[in-house]
Structures are given as structure tokens and as C-alpha cells.
Image (cartoon, rainbow, N blue to C red):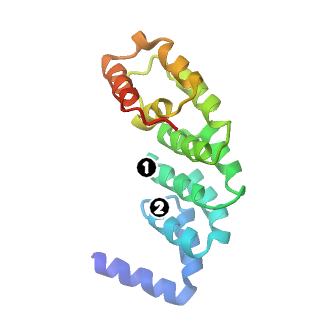
């Protein structure tokens, strides 16, 4: 069955062209979109951003959306910054927000920390937090994140507090 799917995909690539097939695959926001996004970013970076934007908005799985955001972050220049900022501020998936924040921080953008601090504060009272959010908050060297982590620390469940302490003790600050 896998072989048939691959043969069907290859026939489509031969008939319609690799670029078109990759763009359409990324735009679906489906299970295969992250792999197709990697190929699109590598082979056709100039065509990648609009397809990634559509795919991100259509993705219904957190990991798919996060990987598409990661692919957008691989594009050079300022073009993907608007998309990353939008994802940072509005994504329904915490992992995708944290991915966008990390990519923006890596680009030297100051917006990442305040946006994630505000998001962190909005999560107070949740029983479960996404690991990626905790990872971002504990891996930055900003005093703002440490203040946010400390405020209301005892209100978090024990598991969350332990994870925060473990991550901070690893000392991987950026």
C-alpha cells in the first residue's frame, strides 16, 4: 500500500511538476506537509512562504503546525518574520507559539520574550502545560521570564514545578 502511494505521488510529480506538488502538499496542512515543506524550502525557497502560511492556518495537529512554523523560520531574510509574529501571538497550539518564539529570539527579535511572558501568565491555573512553553520560558536569559516563572510558582501542580526546576537547573540560556 505504501508503494502504491509513492508511485501515485511520483506519477503526479512527473505530470504536474515537483514545485506544484510540493506547494499543494504544504498548503493542505496535513500529516505529510512537514516533509513536503522541507523539500519546498530547500528547492524553491521563493515559493515557500505563501504555501507555509496556508498550511499553518489549515493544520489541525499541533506537531504539524509547529513543524511548518519551523520550516518558515528556515527561510532567510525578513519575509517570514510577519508570519512568525502572527503565530507567536495567535496560534491555538502552545507548541507552535513556543516554536515561533524560539525562531524569533534566534533572529534577535525582542518581541518573543514579552509575548511568551504574557502567554505564560494567561495559562495560570492550567493543570498541564506544553513542554515547549516551559522549555522556552526556562531557556531564555531574560529577567522577565524568571520573574514570570516565580510569580504564582506554588500555584502550579507539582509536576509543572518540578519540570521548571529541572529545566532551569540545566542552565541552557539563550
Sequence-wise, the earlier of marks 2 and 1 is 2
Identify the image quadrant of residue 89.
top right
Residue displayed at 45% across by 87% down: 11
Instruction: Please state, as top left, top right, bottom left or bottom right, where the N terminus lies in the image.
Output: bottom left
Determine which of the numbered discs, if any, sits on residue 5 in the image: none
Residue that carries the numbered disc 2 in the rendered image:
34
Q: Which residue is mark 1?
A: 63
Secondary structure beneath dot 2 equals: helix
The spot of residue 97 in percent (x, y) is 55, 40
| Mark 2 vs 1: CB contact within 8 A | yes
- Is residue 172 toward the left or the right of residue 146 in the image? left
Q: Position of residue 35 (x, y in %)?
A: 45, 66
Residue name at image x 36 percent, y 79 percent: 6
Q: CA distance from mark 2 to mark 1?
A: 9 Å
Q: Nearer the viewer, residue 26 or 28?
A: 26
Q: How many marks?
A: 2
Amino acid at each position: 500500500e505504501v508503494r502504491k502511494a509513492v508511485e501515485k505521488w511520483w506519477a503526479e510529480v512527473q505530470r504536474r511538476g515537483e514545485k506544484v506538488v510540493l506547494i499543494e502538499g504544504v498548503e493542505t496542512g496535513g500529516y505529510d506537509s512537514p516533509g513536503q515543506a522541507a523539500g519546498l524550502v530547500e528547492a524553491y525557497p521563493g515559493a515557500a512562504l505563501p504555501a507555509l502560511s496556508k498550511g499553518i492556518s489549515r493544520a489541525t495537529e499541533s506537531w504539524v503546525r509547529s513543524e511548518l512554523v519551523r520550516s518558515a523560520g528556515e527561510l532567510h531574510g525578513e519575509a517570514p518574520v510577519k508570519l512568525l509574529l502572527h503565530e507567536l501571538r495567535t496560534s491555538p497550539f502552545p507548541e507552535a507559539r513556543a516554536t515561533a518564539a524560539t525562531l524569533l529570539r534566534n533572529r534577535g527579535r525582542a518581541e518573543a520574550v514579552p509575548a511568551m511572558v504574557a502567554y505564560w501568565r494567561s495559562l495560570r491555573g492550567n493543570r498541564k502545560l506544553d513542554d515547549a512553553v516551559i522549555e522556552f520560558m526556562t531557556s531564555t536569559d531574560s529577567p522577565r521570564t524568571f520573574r514570570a516563572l516565580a510569580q504564582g510558582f506554588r500555584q502550579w501542580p507539582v509536576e509543572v514545578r518540578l519540570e521548571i526546576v529541572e529545566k532551569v537547573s540545566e542552565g541552557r540560556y539563550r
